[in-house]
C-alpha cells in the first residue's frame, strides 16, 4: 500500500484468518491504528508505517508482538505511550529476530534503564529511537549484541556515561547520541572497539574531559560532531590515520547506509539539517561550543576531504594555520568566538568552494586577503569584533602598506619622529628666514637698523621727557 493517499483508520482486522507476512503502508495518510490491530498477526515479519499521521498508543496495537517480526518501522507519526511492559522490559523482547527497529520522531516514553533485551537482540542491526521522550541509562551487558550497525538515540532524555555496552559492537557505522544528557568522558577504547565507525555524533550533551588522542585511530570516520559539550584541553594534532577525512567522499557512495530513510540531524552552514545520507555525502568536523584551548593543530589542514569545519565558541588561540588553503573542498568554515590572533592567511582566499565563513570575535589583525573567493563575502559581520582587521568589506586600511599590528605600531612611532623633525626644521627655517634675510641683503639690514635706532630714540626721548616732567613737579 506504500506511497498512496490512503487515510483514516487502518483496517483493524487485517490479519483475520490469514497468514499475512508483510504490511507496507509507509507514506500514506492513515490517522489511526486501533488497539490490538496486530493481535492475531502471528506470521507477520515486516510492519512499515513510516510517515503517516497515526495517533495511537503503539504498545496497545500489539497484544503479543509476532515472534517472527524482523522489521518494525513506524517513524514520523504521532505514536505515544510507554514502550515498557510491567516487568520494565520493552514489549518487543519476544521478537528475537528483530533486525530493524525505527520508532523515531514520535512521542514515545519510558525509562529504558532496566530493559536489557534491547541490547542483546542478536539480530538487531539498525535501531533508531531518536526524537521521542525516552529516558534512563543504557544498561551494561556482559554479552551484548555484536551486529549493531546503526544506533540513533538522539533527542531524548537519556543520561549516564558513554554506553559501555557498545564496546563489543564492532560493526557499528553510525552512532548518534546527540541531544541527551549523557555525561563523563569519551572512552579511550572507542576507536579500537568501533573500527568501522563513520558517523559519530555526541553533540548537545554534558560530555567533558579531553578529546582522547585515541579518537584519531578511526580510519573510516567522516563526521565527528562533538559540539555543545564541555570538552577541555587541546585538539589532538596527529591526523595521519584519519583516512575517512583525508579522502574525498564521493556522492552516491551509500554502501554503508542501512535504511533509505536513515537520517542525521546536524548543523551545517548555520542551519539545522536533517541529513539523509543515501543521496549525498558528508565529511565534517564540528567541535564548536566547548572549552577547547591552545592552538588549531597544524595537522588539521591535512584533512583535505573536509567540507565542513566548525571550531567556533571555544578558547582557541594562536594563528589560523597558514596552509588552510589546502582544504580545497571546504564549503563552510566557522572559527568565530575564539582568541585567534595574527593575520588571516592569504591562502584562505584560495578556497574555491567556500560558501560560509565566520571569523568574528577574535583578535585577528591586518589586511583581509583580497582573493576572488573572499570578494564574495560582502557581509562585514563575519569579521566583526576583530579590532585589528581592515580591508574589504571592512574599512580601508589606513596605511596601504600596513600588514599587521606591529607595522602599524612602527608607523605610529615613525609619525611622531617625523613630527619632531618638522618642528625642529620649522624653527631653524624660521630663524634663518628672519635673520638670514637681514644679513644677506644690505638695504634690508639698513632699514632694520634704522628702525631699531628710531625705536630706541623714541624710547629715550620719552624717558627724558618723563624725567623732566617728574622733576618739574617736584620742584
Ligand atoms: C483475534 O482472534 C480472536 C480469536 O479468534 C478474536 O476474538 C479477535 O477478535 C481477533 N482480533 C482481531 C483484531 O482480529
Ligand atoms: C542531567 O544530568 C545531570 C547529572 O549528570 C543532572 O544533574 C541534571 O539534572 C540532568 N539534566 C536533565 C535536563 O535531565
Ligand atoms: C557552528 O556551531 C554553532 C553552535 O555551536 C552554530 O551556532 C553555528 O551556526 C555553526 N556554524 C556553522 C557555519 O554552521
Ligand atoms: C558569526 O558568529 C557569531 C558568533 O559565533 C554569531 O553570533 C553570528 O551570528 C555569526 N554570523 C554569521 C553571519 O553567521
Image (tube, rainbow, N blue to C red):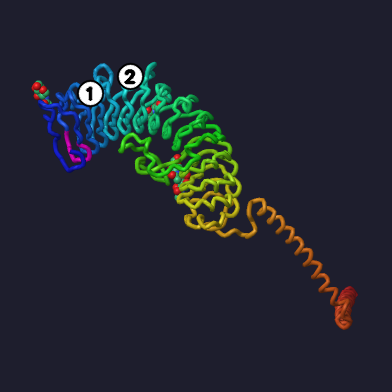
Question: Most extreme residue toward the bottom, as rendered?
Answer: 443
Q: Which residue is mark 2?
A: 116
Decide if residue 155 is on the left or right side of residue 26.
right
Q: Which contiguous range is marked in magenta? A: 25-32
Residue at 47% over, 50% down: 354
Callout 1: 10 Å neighbours few (<14), some, many (20+)?
A: some
Instruction: Answer whether residue 31 is magenta in the image.
Output: yes
Q: Is residue 458 visible?
A: no
For the residue with label 2, is its CB less than 8 Å from the closest atom of ligand 2? no
Task: Indicate which disc, 2 or 1, sits on the residue closer to the N terminus.
Answer: 1
Q: In this rendering, is residue 430 above or below 292?
A: below
Tag count: 2
Residue at 31% over, 28% down: 134
Residue at 38% over, 35% down: 256
Quadrant housing the N terminus:
top left
Residue 324's spot in the image, x, y percent?
Answer: 55, 46
Q: Is residue 123 visible?
A: yes
Quadrant housing the C terminus:
bottom right
Callout 2: 10 Å neighbours few (<14), some, many (20+)?
A: some
Which residue is nearer to you in this view: 270 or 430?
270
Instruction: Answer whether residue 116 is magenta in the image.
Output: no
Q: Which residue is mark 1?
A: 68
Which image quarter: residue 50?
top left
Residue 417's spot in the image, x, y percent?
Answer: 74, 58
Decide if residue 14 is on the left or right side of residue 348.
left
Amino acid at each position: 500500500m506504500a506511497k498512496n493517499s490512503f487515510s483514516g483508520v487502518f483496517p483493524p482486522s487485517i490479519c483475520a484468518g490469514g497468514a499475512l507476512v508483510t504490511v507496507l503502508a509507509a507514506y500514506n495518510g492513515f490517522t489511526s491504528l486501533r488497539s490490538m490491530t496486530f493481535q492475531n498477526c502471528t506470521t507477520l515479519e515486516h510492519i512499515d508505517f513510516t510517515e503517516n499521521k497515526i495517533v495511537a498508543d503503539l504498545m496497545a496495537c500489539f497484544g503479543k508482538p509476532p515472534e517472527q517480526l524482523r522489521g518494525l518501522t513506524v517513524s514520523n507519526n504521532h505514536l505515544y505511550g510507554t514502550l515498557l511492559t510491567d516487568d520494565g522490559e520493552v514489549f518487543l523482547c519476544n521478537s528475537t529476530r528483530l533486525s530493524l527497529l525505527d520508532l523515531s520522531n514520535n512521542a514515545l516514553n519510558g525509562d529504558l534503564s532496566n530493559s536489557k533485551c534491547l541490547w542483546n537482540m542478536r539480530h538487531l542491526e539498525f535501531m533508531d529511537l531518536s526524537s521521542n521522550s525516552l529516558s534512563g541509562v543504557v544498561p551494561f551487558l556482559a554479552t551484548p549484541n555484536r551486529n549493531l550497525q546503526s544506533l540513533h538515540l538522539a533527542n531524548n532524555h537519556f543520561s549516564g556515561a558513554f554506553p559501555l555496552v557498545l564496546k563489543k559492537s564492532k560493526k557499528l557505522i553510525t552512532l548518534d547520541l546527540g541531544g541527551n544528557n549523557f555525561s563523563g568522558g569519551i572512552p579511550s577504547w572507542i576507536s579500537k572497539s568501533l573500527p568501522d565507525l563513520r558517523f559519530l555524533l555526541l553533540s548537545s550533551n554534558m560530555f567533558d574531559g579531553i578529546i582522547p588522542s585515541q579518537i584519531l585511530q578511526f580510519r573510516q570516520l567522516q563526521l565527528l560532531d562533538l559540539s555543545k559539550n564541555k570538552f577541555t584541553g587541546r585538539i589532538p594534532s596527529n591526523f595521519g590515520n584519519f583516512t575517512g577525512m583525508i579522502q574525498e567522499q564521493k556522492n552516491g557512495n551509500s554502501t554503508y547506509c542501512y535504511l533509505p530513510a536513515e537520517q542525521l540531524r546536524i548543523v551545517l552552514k548555520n542551519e539545522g539539517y536533517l541529513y539523509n545520507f543515501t543521496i549525498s555525502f558528508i565529511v565534517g568536523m564540528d567541535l564548536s561550543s566547548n572549552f577547547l584551548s591552545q592552538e588549531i593543530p597544524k595537522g588539521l589542514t591535512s584533512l583535505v576531504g573536509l567540507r565542513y569545519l566548525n571550531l567556533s565558541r571555544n578558547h582557541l588561540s594562536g594563528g589560523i594555520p597558514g596552509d588552510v588553503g589546502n582544504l580545497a573542498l571546504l564549503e563552510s568554515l566557522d572559527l568565530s568566538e575564539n582568541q585567534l590572533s595574527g593575520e588571516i592567511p592569504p591562502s584562505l582566499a584560495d578556497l574555491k568552494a567556500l560558501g560560509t565563513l565566520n571569523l568574528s570575535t577574535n583578535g585577528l589583525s591586518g589586511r583581509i586577503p583580497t582573493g576572488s573567493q573572499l570578494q564574495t563575502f560582502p557581509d562585514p559581520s563575519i569579521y566583526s569584533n576583530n579590532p585589528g582587521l581592515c580591508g574589504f568589506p571592512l574599512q580601508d586600511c589606513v596605511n596601504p602598506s600596513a600588514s599587521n599590528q606591529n607595522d602599524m605600531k612602527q608607523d605610529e612611532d615613525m609619525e611622531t619622529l617625523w613630527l619632531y623633525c618638522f618642528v625642529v626644521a620649522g624653527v631653524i627655517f624660521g630663524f634663518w628666514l628672519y635673520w638670514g634675510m637681514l644679513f644677506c641683503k644690505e638695504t634690508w639690514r639698513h632699514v632694520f637698523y634704522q628702525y631699531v635706532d628710531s625705536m630706541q630714540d623714541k624710547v629715550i626721548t620719552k624717558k627724558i621727557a618723563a624725567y623732566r616732567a617728574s622733576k618739574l613737579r617736584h620742584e
